[in-house]
Amino acid sequence: MRTLILACTFAVLAVTVPPAPQAPKVVRVTAERFRFTPDEIRMRLGETLELHLESDDTNHGFHIAGTEIRRVLPKRGQGEIVVTFTPDHAGRYAFECSKVCGAGHEFMHGAIVVDQE
């Protein structure tokens, strides 16, 4: 009787799968009487921020300095706007009301603070 030895070769195929996209960080912001609430938002570099903005009184503007983001918030009860922001570097991004809304308009500002990963 003879012994038969079979050699098998298996090919292993390595597949690189890109990471699944992260869901955006959602923050609700209310504008009213010369302030944004919250007026400071923290996020990490690499995240996308989705801001849901609404007014609790009159029309207000929303502008992130140094970006193309400039929108008008409708009056109370007339809906919200959604702004998506993906920063390209860590740091502090100032935002402000970009529509004159009354005597305290110049105090209506805040910041998005982007931390390194």
Image (tube, rainbow, N blue to C red):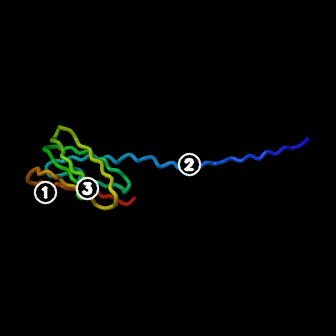
Circle 2 crowding by C-alpha within 10 Å: few under 14, some 14–19, many from 20: few
Residue type marked 1? Glu
Q: Position of residue 27 (x, y in %)?
A: 29, 47
Number of the label disc, if any, that sits on residue 67: 3
Residue at image position (27%, 47%) is 83
Q: Quadrant of residue 87?
A: bottom left
Kindly report the distance in space between the C-alpha atoms of the residues bearing marks 2 and 1: 55 Å
Label 1: element kind: helix
Q: Is residue 32 left or right of residue 66?
A: left
Circle 3 crowding by C-alpha within 10 Å: few under 14, some 14–19, many from 20: few
- Say whether disc 3 or disc 2 marks the residue closer to the N-terminus: 2
The residue wearing badge 2 is 15
In the image, 21 versus 8, the foreground residue is 8
Residue type marked 2? Val
Mark 1 vs 3: CB contact within 8 A: no
Q: Position of residue 77 (x, y in %)?
A: 17, 37
In the image, 49 versus 30, the foreground residue is 49
Nearer the viewer's eye, disc 2 or disc 1? 2
Residue at image position (68%, 47%) is 10
Kindly report the distance in space between the C-alpha atoms of the residues bearing marks 1 and 3: 19 Å
Q: Position of residue 46 (x, y in %)?
A: 38, 55
Label 3: element kind: loop
Q: Position of residue 47 (x, y in %)?
A: 37, 52
Number of the label disc, if any, that sits on residue 7: none
- Considering every residue shown, the one lying at the far right of the view is 1
Quadrant for the C terminus in the image = bottom left
The residue wearing badge 1 is 106
- Say whether disc 1 or disc 3 marks the residue closer to the N-terminus: 3
- Say whether disc 2 or disc 1 marks the residue closer to the N-terminus: 2
Nearer the viewer's eye, disc 1 or disc 3? 3
Residue at image position (31%, 55%) is 42
Residue type marked 3? Thr
